[in-house]
Each structure stands twice: as structure tokens, then as C-alpha cells.
Image: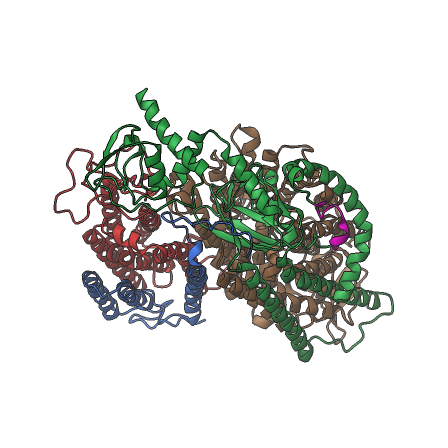
Amino acid sequence: MSVLSSLMGTMQADSAGQAVGQAAQQASGAEQAATQAGQAVINIPKTAWQDPGTNTFWLPEAASVTTDNVDWIYLGLIGLSIFCFIGITAAVVYFTIKYRQRPGHERPLPSPSHNNPLEITWTLIPAIICVFLFVAGWRGYVDLATPPQHALEISVTGLKWKWKFTYPNGVDDPNGELHVPVNRSVRLVMSSNDVIHSFFIPAFRIKQDVVPQRYTQLWFKATQPGVYRMYCAEYCGLEHSQMKTVIVVHEPGGYADYLARIEEQALNIPPAELGKKMYDNYCIACHTLDGTTKVGPSFKDLVLGGQNEMTDGSSIVVDENYIRESIVEPQAKVRKGYPASMPSFKGVLSDKKINGVIAFIKSLNDGSQQ
Amino acid sequence: MAAHGHGEHGETLSHIASMRVLVGTFVALLFLTVITVAAAYVDFGGRGLNLAVAMLIATVKASLVILYFMHLRYDRLFHTVIFVAGLLAATLFLGFALVDRGQYEDDVIWDKDNQPAIKPYTPEL
Amino acid sequence: MSEHAHGDQKGSRFIQHHYDDAQHQFDSGKLAIWLFLAQEVLFFSALFVAYIIFRTQHPEIFEYGSQYLDRTMGAVNTLVLIGSSFTAAYAVRCAQLRNQRTLVICLAITLACALGFLTIKYFEYSEKIHHGTLYGKKFVPHVDPDGATFPEDAVIKPCIHGSEGNLGADPSIPPPAEGEAAPCPDNTNMFFTLYFAMTGLHGLHVLFGVFVFIWLLVRAMKGHFTPDYYGPVDYAALYWHLVDLIWIFLFPLYYLI
Amino acid sequence: MAKENPENPSYTSFLEDPHGIMGHRGGFWGWFGTFDHKRIGIMYLCGILASLMVGGLFALLVRLELFFPGETIIGPQAYNEFFTLHGAIMVFLVIVPGIPAALGNIALPMQLGAPDVAFPRLNLASFYLWCVGAVLLVGAMAMGFVTDQTGVDTGWTFYTPYSLKEHTAGDAILMSLVGVFLLGFSSIFTGLNFLTTIHKFRAKGMGWFQMPLNLWALYATGIMQVLATPVLGITVLLLSVERFLEIGIFDPVLGGDPILFQHFFWFYSHPAVYIMIIPAMGVISELITTFSHKHIFGYRFIAWSSLSLALLSFLVWGHHLFVSGQSRMAGMIFSALTFTVAIPSAIKVFNWTATLYKGVIRLQTPMLYALSFVLLFTIGGLTGLFLGVISIDVHLHDTYFVVAHFHYVMMGSTLVAFLGGLHYWFPKFTGKMYPEKLGQFISVMVFFGFNLTFLPQFVMGSRGMTRRYWDYDPEFTLMHQLSTIGAFVLGISLFIVVCYLFWAAYKGEKAPPNPWGASTLEWESPSPPPLYNFVEQPPLPELYEYDELVYDDEEGGYVRKLRDGGEVRSYRRYVRSKPSGGH
């Protein structure tokens, strides 16, 4: 049966292919703007939409490992449905023509009104087919729903009418596209800020609702570099139809430079602002800004040039070196009356970030003093 | 259909509950109410047990009301089928909703205090 | 309740023309009222499902929240409802035995108990409004507005609202002074959301019962109910037993556990 | 007393003999205050056809908007309100009450041999609830255009948290929720009425297996209406209280759970889609056996499959939540159970096809609708298998594939069966024949218009075209245009059907009591039948036996000839004047 369907698929594909081809040409124009940034730095091959050869009549092109679970059973089921539909239509049309009312056509007796063996057979056969369909579907779904262990984790946040992607290095994607490496399984940890959205990538055959106050997850492993479309599938209001973006799958090795590039882009903001960002990500857990003590001393009373008493009785002058040292090795000089429980940020904060934190602390006190 | 009631004073449309049954059920219900309130002050050890005891007493009270006050015991079987069908649909609804609730993996539950830490990017597997 | 044979021929019997006889009409009505009760069970089942699901997810909310409820008022309400259930069943017996005087008395008692239930519920609700322990954003437990704080030996202290545990707090209402209130588990307002939803809907059904029994009382006094036409009394009693049933489950779920 | 019936002085048809709240008064209160199940059925019919036209109009506007990508005629907000209007009106006003309330009210008591339904006043109360609910629902949704507030744009499913206050301002949604609440109760009371009538009002000697299959279907529908619709009532009540008082049960910010709303909603809505399809199957069983002039094939199997569908429909609602954050175990259970529902439907389709074997098939309008039902329902059922397989549903959920699937099952099956049943019982309750040739042509147009509309949507859906999109990517343009053309063909043919039926109700030629040679009880009484359906209780005919029914030219319809050659024209003496013209 699947031969029938694939034959059907390819036959239609050629005729439909041209139509899709031209339509895709304008489509790539619209995409061009979206991938301007990607195009400039990393040469991304034409999107798979542009050469319709790879997709069958029914399904968009298969660009991820997750499509193996879906495609074969999908096309098989299409073949089965076409076969059943043709069978029933043929029976109905044949009976209608053969037994239509015409003069001289009396009802040929005996006309059966029930036949239990026949009824049993056409109850069991659909039942067996259904069991097979369920098992095939379930095995595919288990694979779709369990992300592999060492997948690359990207956090996705759906908010009203746009998507926010946060990469492992803590940087948000500047122009709202999801960039992933090729042949590397990626796990998306998703949540929403307001209403229910749904993350749907037709090319990977995956979809998962994004629910507020709850995490949902998705995984895929792109096998073909390119740019694939992504839609919001759950109705979410006015611009539900505009809430779509693009998944850019990079060439091997291209992904690390992209991450570095956007991190660089994210860092060349004024140091104090960068410091504030670092404060929000890391320091806020123990240090406050308004003078009240939380776990550690408040940044407000770290006055540059002021005297601070240490646990071992000695008192030191607060300056950049002291702040830098207590960031890198906090146990060296512990302030009196505070627990020595601060973790070291040695590998976490780069020098640029530490300078940013220091500038931020200075800006706190400059504002209040001068 | 001949009337099938068998009350003391001639036939009537449906079963007549005798005074003894009515008062007996009423007293039993009062007694069980006292018991269930008392049971609330006794800790049966563990969260589930308290719930189970309270529900058991409530079910006994409910079945008393259904069987005797609502005449279900003397009535047509089909009325019992209807009521049980209602209960069955309700428990079905509860059962599947609980299956869904109970099967969430722990990393899916939203936990305000510890957001999922994002593992740093390791270029190669 | 749903079908009252108030046929067009006035006369002593209220058997409608398209029924064969009294038994046919009574049995049809009985089948219909049982279908209506099954439908009511489903109507309340959704709330019981919500209760059980939230309880399996956050048992601490329910244990903390149930302290706010007054057990004696709940117990009295249960006794009131069981009493009215008894008098309703007794009323059916009187109608079957053509004992109109006791029928009227029983219906009157049932009506009185129903009204008593509603008044007790009114007191409970007003006390909760007074202490500010309401549903959703309005869950702002604070000291008594007229200055008197919670009595020292109060078993439960109002918890600090606005602690980041309770999202969506109403910022306009100031949290109580320091040290007076204990932190309450996250989303404690969910307990009161469910409490008001279920007891409110049950209260509404008691209210419907009150109107039904007033209407029955009027007809009983006019002597409409005879041994071969007492359908409405029987159906109203069945409906009332179901309302009592639901309260029998509601009372322990909220007040006792 | 009732007006004299000019043609047959010895009986007055229910059309001339009003019997209502205000006693015997004709005119408005004769209709609006009547207890007669046939009149209530006709009033339901008019309300439902009007709602069909209004709902269809919004469907055409939605399709017109999608003719070109980007803005064609309306902006996104208006588009969202239009598809919500289309969805809610069609589901709550047309399809759910459609066959049970309109055709069921007309046919059920007569097929049982009963004078009326068990509770006539409850029947009238359900109709009033339907009217008030309809006014509230359509009024609330139209508020978006009349007042400056936003109308209802949440889709007919009212998913939270979008349908909560902070995302959709305005109180149009509260009004439509109250409307849906009342429509729910109208459906419950209809179901309750039908169950009691089938139990207590069967004619003497009509056991459970001498009952026409249409009544088995209405019985199964009654069970679902009584047991499933209250959950819609409580869900809609909770959502309106949520919007009104912000109690926070579905609001995630206050600790509520939006997925719980989806469980509540779909626990009703899946039995609701079976409330829509099972009465349609009942009508089709009647049409196929009558127009093949042959006993139905596998009576017991069809009867039991109706009942089993009703019970299984309560188990499968989770397949709407496969990708909504449901746990995997629940997904597995619901996917497995969804396949158990496919089997009874398959049995029915095979039995209908087998009924055609060795029959004498007349392709009149009702039969054309029945045959197109069989074909379209087969496609609908098979595409349902796709959505049952859980891994395929992950790809297909919320795409145009789902839109096409449920239109094949709701419109291609339920609405086509509704039209077939309408043409089938039209001579009985109006006493007039509809124009046969025009009816046949339009039914073929409906079939082709429908396929032209929804086959391209299957292809679009599986290629990734998401549902409820105001704007779409350019490569779907061709298929959207085909679908829009098909929608207009469909819209026009349905409009013509409504026109010629209203015309035929007044100007149509006189209909004989049994124009189709059907063997069920309602064709034993004259058409239009008297107030209590039968002048005197006719002998119970042998169910689905057509040997006795012979076509009689003089009467223009079928007459029952006893086997020993003696002619029984129990209703002959009521038809004095000779009806003009053959069938």
C-alpha cells in the first residue's frame, strides 16, 4: 500500500512542485530579511523549502531525527486510507448501479438481512489494524517525548506574539531566531509568560504547548543545515498568526562562533549596565542594594576608600583589588559578622564581567556621594 | 401496570417506607455524624489515612441515605443503573484526570525557588 | 422537580391526557428525576475532581486552610441537613398514606431546616469576609479592621500576605505588622477558591430547594396530594436527599481533614 | 375549537389545531406557546436553519479573508471574532441541537406510536432555553461590531488563560458563557425527555428490538446529553465566575491550572461530537433501508454499536490534549482508547454498504444525501485514525488537517444527514412535497462543493499550515483559493436548499401519507398528522419489511397491501382529493 501512496506522492509532487517552487521563491525573499544576520557571518545553504524535491506531496521535508517516527507510519496510513476509501466507494457505486430501481427489476430474493460471520470478520480486521496503529504510534511517541541525556539545553519563553530563546551561555538571541548546531540533539525547556502558546516546527514534525507556570520540553536533532519555519500552533490572541520565527541549523563548527559572536555583541554595553546584568543573574541571591543585610553585606555600604573590619580583626581599605579578589576567592578576606559561604565565580565571570560588577558598585556609591 | 405498592392502607404508586426504617436511618446518620467529627480529632497517622477514614464514614452515610431515604433498595433496578452510571462517569473523569496529574516528571513541575539551572555549552558530546 | 403534573383538567386528579394512568405518569416522573439526579452528580463531580487534583498537588494548602473553618458551624449544618432529609422522607410517607396534616408539618420543618442551613452559611461567609480570607486576589488575611487583633490564643494566626509565596497579592492592602502573622503556604487562596466554589454552588442548590418546598407547601395545604398523585413530593424529596448527600461529602472534605 | 381542515374533514392536522399554554389560540401563541412536539420541532428547525445561515455567513467571510495572504477584507481582530462566531454558532446552535431537537422532536414520538413526548412542557422549556441562549450567544459575539468593546475572540473552546480577564477585556465573553450555559441545559432537558419517552411511551408490542434504528441512535444521544452536558455547565459556570470574581481556579498567576480547564472542557466536548454524529447515523440507517426497499443489514450490530459509541465516548477525551502538556502515560491510555471508538463506526459503514446489496435503490434526494454521507463519513473516520495515532497527532494537532477532519465529520456527515432527514420527513410534517429534481441537483452540488472546500485543507494541514491563522505563508495560497471557491459553492447550495424548502412548505404539491414506502410507524398516519399523531392506533407494522408496501399511482405514494391480496388503506379514507402529479 505504501508503494501506492509514494507513487501518488511523487506523481503529484512534480505537478505541485512547480507551483510550490514559484511560491517558495517569493517566500525566500521574506526569509532573506529574517536571516540577514545569519547570512552575513555564516554561509547558510538555501532553505529546504526552495528545492521542493526533498518533500513529498503530503509532508514537508524531513530535517530531523524525530521525523523517522512519523513519516513511515503517516504515508502507510495514507495508503491504507486511500485503499479503504476506494474499496467502500466502489462497493457503494457498484451496488447502486446494479440494483437501481428500473422497470422489471424486482428485488432479487433472498436478500440477506444479517450474516454473523461476515459481521465478526469486519469487526476483527479493523480491530487488528487499530492495535497495530496504536503500537506503532506509541513507540514513535515514546521516542518523541524522551529527550536524550546529553542534549544541548536551550530555554524558550513564549510571550504574547514573539519567542525568546536563551542559549546556554545565558545570552538571549538578539533577533528572536533559534540557532542550533547540526547533528546535535537539542532539548528545549519551554515556559510561557502569559497565555498558552505552542512550539511547532513542521520540518521536524514536533509540537508542544507552552504553558504558563509550568515547564514543557521538546527535543530534536537537526540532520541537515538550513533554515526551517516555526509557528505558534495554539491560538493566543491578536497576532497569533505573526508569532512565527525561524530555526537556523548551522554547519558543523559554525555554532560555537555564533554563540561567541552574540555573547560579544551582548557584552559591549557600558560596564555599569553589564554589572547590573551580572548582579541580576548572580549576586542578587545574597547581596541587596538598599543597605539591608541578606546573606552577605549589601553593595550599598561597599564604599570605595572606606574601612571594613575583617573577621581576623584586621581592617582593610575597600578598593577594586579587594572586590575583584573577593569575587574570585571570597574566602581570602571575609567581612566581620558575615558567614564565609560565598561561592567562587572564578570560571563563571570573565574579566570584562568583573570590571562591569566593580563599575556597577562604584556607580551605586558615586550616585549617592558626589 | 398494576400498582405494586404494599403499604398498610391499600395500594399506592410506589413503595412506602415504614416508620421504623425511617427513624432507624435517621438515628444511624446522626450517630455517624458524631463519629466522623470525633474521628477528625484523632490522628490516624499519615495524611492518607485521615482522608480514607473520613471518606469511608461519608460513604456509609451516603449509602444509607440512598438506599433507605431515596427508596433505591425497593425501587426499579433501572433507577440504580442510572445513578451508578452517573457515579461511574464521575469516577472515570476523576480517574483519568488523576492519571494525568500523577504522571508528571519532576523536572516539569514549576518550582519557584529553584529554576532549572542551564548547563553550560559543551561544544562536543 | 423537573416535571409537575399540573394538568389542564383541574379536578381531583392531575393525570395529564397523554399518560395512560397515574402509575404511568408517576413512573415516567420517577425515571426523569433519577436522570436529573445523575446529571446533578456529574454537575458536582467536576468540582470534586478539581478538589482532589489540587489536594494531591498541594496537600499543605488544604491542611493549613481548613484551620480557618469553624467545625462547630459545619457540624450543626450537617445535623440540620440530615434532619431535613428525614422530614422530607417522612413527608413522602405521609403523602402516600393520605395524612395531609403531618405532610404539611413535615414540609414546613424541612423548609425551616433549609432556611436554617442558609442562615448558618451566611454567618460563616460574613465571618470569612470579615477576616479577609477570600478567594483569588482577595485572599488578604489581616488584623480585624476595627483594631482588635487576633486573640493571643487563636489557634491559627493570619499569615503574611504579599510574601512572594502568594502571587497576585492585592498591593493596596498593607500586610500585617511584623511578627504578628506566620507565612502561609504558596497559593493558599486556592483553598478558599475551591471552598467558596463548592459550598457556594451547594448553597445555591439549597436555595432552589427552598423555592421548591415553598411551592410544595402551598400545594399540600390546598390538598392536591393524594395516594395516587404525590409525584412532586417524592421527586422534591429525592432532590433534597441528593443535596444532603453532597453536603455529607463536602463537610469532612473541607471542615474535618 | 380548531379550524376545519378543508381537505379531510374527518381529522384536523396539527398545523390547524394549536394546543398551547394559552389554550386554543392560533397565530403567534399557537406556535410559540404550543406543547405539541411537532410544532416545537418545526420551531427548532426554523431557529436552526437561521443559525446555519448566520454561521455559514461567517464561514464565508473567514474563507474570503484567507483568499490572499495578508489582509484581504478584515483585520486580525475581526478575523478572530469571525472564526469564533462561526465555531460557536455552528457547534452550540446548529449541530448539537440539530438532528435531536429538530428532526428528533418531529419523528421520535410518531415512530414510537406515542401521542407526544413524556414531558411536553419541559420540551417547550428547552426550546425557550435554546432561544434565550441563542440570543445571548449571538448578541455577545456581535458586541464586537456594535460596541467598541472587543467581542468574543477566544475560539469556541474558550481556552484559559487567554479567555481570562487580563487577556480579553470586555464582558462579551461573560454574556456568551451564560448563553452557552443555557444552551447546555436545553440540550440536557431534551435528552432527558427523549430517554423517558423511549422507555415509557413505546407502542404496544414494540419491544427494544422492534424499535427503528433512529430511536436507538436518539437513545444513545440522550445518554450522552444527560451525562456529559452538565460538565460543560459547570465548566462554563466556573469560567464566568472566574471572569466575574477572579476566583483563580484556572488562572495560573493565582495558582490555578489551565490544563484542568482543558480536561473539563473536553470531557464534555468529545461526547458532544458524538451527540452530533450518532443521531446522524440513526437518520442514515432509516434512509438507506427505506430507499433500498430492503431490510437493514445487521440491525442488532448497528443498534449495539450506537450504544457502545455512547459509552466509549466518555473514555477518549484526552486525544485533544496530546500536545498540551499532558503526561505520557495519559497520552498512551487515551490513544489506545481512541481506537476502540473507531471500530463501531467502521461496523456501521460496512452494514450500510451491505444494506445496498440486492436492494431496489431509488436515488431520490434523501438517498443521495445518505450515500454522500457514507462516502464523506468514511473519509472523516479514516482521517480520525491519523489523529488517533499519537506520534502523527504531534505533527497534525492544531493544523488544517484537524480542521478538515472535523468538518468532514461534522459538516460532511451530520449536516448532510440533517438535510437528508429534513427532505425525508418534510412531506410528513408539512404535507407538501419539495421539488425533487432541484433537490437532487443541489445535493450533488453540496457533495462536490464540500469536497472542493476541504480536500485541499488536508494537504495544507499536513504540510504545516496552522489553524486559526489570519495570515499565512505564500506557498499555501493556491490551496486556500481552491478552498474558498468550494466554500462559496457550498454556501450558495445550502442557501438554495433553505429557500426551496420554505417555498415548498407553502406552494409545494400535496404529499401522500407514505411517499417513500417506509415501514416505520410514522408513515402509517396521514401527513400532516393530527395533533396526537394517529387517528386511531394503527396495527404495529413488521419493522423494515417492504414486501407489503407497493407503489400506487393513483395516490402517488406507497400503500400497504396485506399478503392475502386484501388492501388495507387505513388512512385512505382521510385523503379525499386526488393528489396531482406522480413522484
Snapshot colouring: by chain
Position of residue C18 measured from the top left corner of the image (x, y, whole percent) = 51, 59
Rendered image quadrant of residue C60 = bottom left
Q: Is residue D433 visible?
A: no
Give the color of chain D as drawn.
brown
Residue B111 among magenta residues: no
Main SS, magenta region, reads loop
- Left or right: C86 as drawn, with respect to A283: left
Q: Where is residue D63 in the image (x, y as percent from the top left)?
A: 69, 41
Chain assigned green: A
Instruction: Count every numbered label the image shows and give the total.
Output: 0
Q: Is residue A193 above or below residue D561?
A: above
Q: Residue at x 35, y 35 (%)?
A: A321
Question: Which residues lie in the magenta part?
Answer: A45-56
Farthest-out residue, right? A104
Chain B: give its colour. blue
- The quarter of the rendered structure image containing the C terminus of chain D is bottom right
Relative depth, front residue between D561 and A269 = A269
Determine which quarter of the picture holds residue C31. bottom left
Percent from the top left, x then y, of residue C164? 32, 41
The residue closer to the viewer here, D313 or A77, is: A77
Residue farthest along the top direction in this orientation: A370
Q: Residue furthest bottom?
A: A117
Q: Residue at x 59, y 69 (%)?
A: A135
Q: Where is residue D451 in the image (x, y as percent from the top left)?
A: 74, 52
Asked if the magenta segment contains residue A49, the reply would be: yes
Is residue D60 visible in this depiction of the protein?
yes
Which colour represents chain C? red
Residue D538, by quadrant, is: bottom right
